[in-house]
Image (spheres, rainbow, N blue to C red):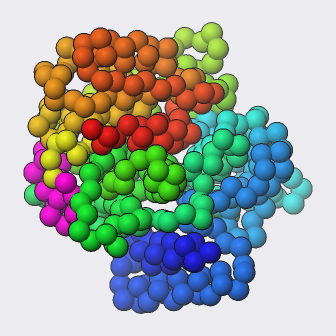
Amino acid sequence: MYQMHKHLLMYFSGMWVPSYLKNQSYTMMKKTFAICLLICLSAGLTCVAQSGQASNVFNADTAHASPYNLSGASYPRIEADSRVTFRFNAPDAQKVQVSIVNVAYDMIKGSDGVWTYTSEPQDKGYHNYWMIVDGAVVVDPATNAFMGYGHMCNGFEIPDPDGGFYQLKDVPHGNVLIKNYYSEVAGSWRHIFVYTPPEYDQNIKARYPVLYLQHGGGEDERVWIEMGRTNLILDNLIAEGKIKPFIVVMETSAVGPQFPMLPRPATAPAATPAPGAAQQATQAPGAPVTTVRPRFSFDKYAELMIRDLIPWVDKNFRTIPDREHRAMSGLSMGAMCTKSVTLAHPETFSYIGLFSGGSIAPDEIRDKSDVKHVFMSYGSRERGSEGVAAAAEALNQAGIKSTSYVSPLTGHEWQSWRRSLYEFAQLLFKE
């Protein structure tokens, strides 16, 4: 229980706040809130473990409120069969829709002015949603908000009986730090999240490898903590002795504006795109495939990493500052970014992880001795999943160590990426 209290106090004391709220009174409010929260926990009250990281306190076969709901809010409600029921109070609205993973569904208005909708069964794991009221995109005020699709979203979680690896447990916990550094390349201050392992503050003579972990399109540096549960995944792996402790740095790859992705009308649920998507999925079974291939250039971000970010991290944290102890990975657009940066800078990175974002061919690697391990993964419902094993085998045949992974029964969403991180982390820094 002490570990949970310490973890919560650290998280809320260092919680992210917008720049316009960073003043003395708000700082005092944060500290007061953190102390009150600790007192409540000591009194035996049940609280959410972290903002965006609710514990899995319900069984998959029991209807319950979404774990991301605000205190006292019953909806969204996760039904026993993994359907989700939404309610939204808008008595004066003419039309209300709920957009689930960027697909809009019409809600039904009751005589009390409350709109309701119950979805089809949803896949296990985290899913984004938001409301559309008379054409305006709004968040559900009864639920926590997260970043996705280039704007703030709400979220719900379908329990996974095999999801213990990302749940909050009574094990030693690392810290999630929020830091600012100035980038000469961007010409601005940058906002990053840094995970340090549980022993970091006690074992002050130790130095650690670093993983640079990238988000997807329309997201930012916070998502790998809030939806990905990176810190909990690594805490649990370290406690089980499955990985060596390492630092994780999460930075936004955007060196410029990002644009929101507008919701589409309802189609087959299994065919919907997801946050971080670099291209659209099939619209429906048998329908023509519509593919959007934006032209991404990661040269500016690569320059920012090499000139500003990595030197700053190596100066301010106890890292092992060489390529053998440095890795980079990302999801979707972040995987594309990872591929671009790591292949252009083999002197800087030796481990590469691509989650739902393409593959690497042997002839793209200039010197096979530059790379210690390439990891490539997809959800089984994603295009690309059918070829990832062959891509890994081609690298292995060329003398480049590679591993492929396909997440069962998931698409281009967070459950695929949580599982991918879990698998990738166990391959890192073993040599």
Question: Foreground: 248 or 298?
Answer: 248
Q: Residue at x 44, y 28 (%)?
A: 377
Q: Nearer the viewer, residue 86 or 39?
A: 39
Q: Is residue 345 visible?
A: yes
Q: Residue at x 51, y 77 (%)?
A: 6
Q: Quick check: is 312 in the magenta stretch? A: yes
Residue drawn at x 62%, y 75% is: 1
- Report whether residue 302 is seen: no
Residue 264 figure quarter: top right
**Residue 125 percent across, percent down from the top left:** 63, 43
Residue 408 in the image: state x and y as whole percent.
60, 27
Q: How many marks?
A: 0
Name the residue at 41% across, 74% down: 14
Please state, as top left, top right, bottom left or bottom right, where the C terminus lies in the image: top left
Q: Measured along the vertical axis of the image, is residue 175 above or below residue 253?
A: below
Region in magenta: 303-320
How far from the left and from the top, in percent, is residue 395?
A: 29, 16
Is 149 left or right of 335, judged from the image as shown?
right
In which quarter of the view is residue 353 placed?
A: top left
- Secondary structure of the magenta portion, mostly? helix
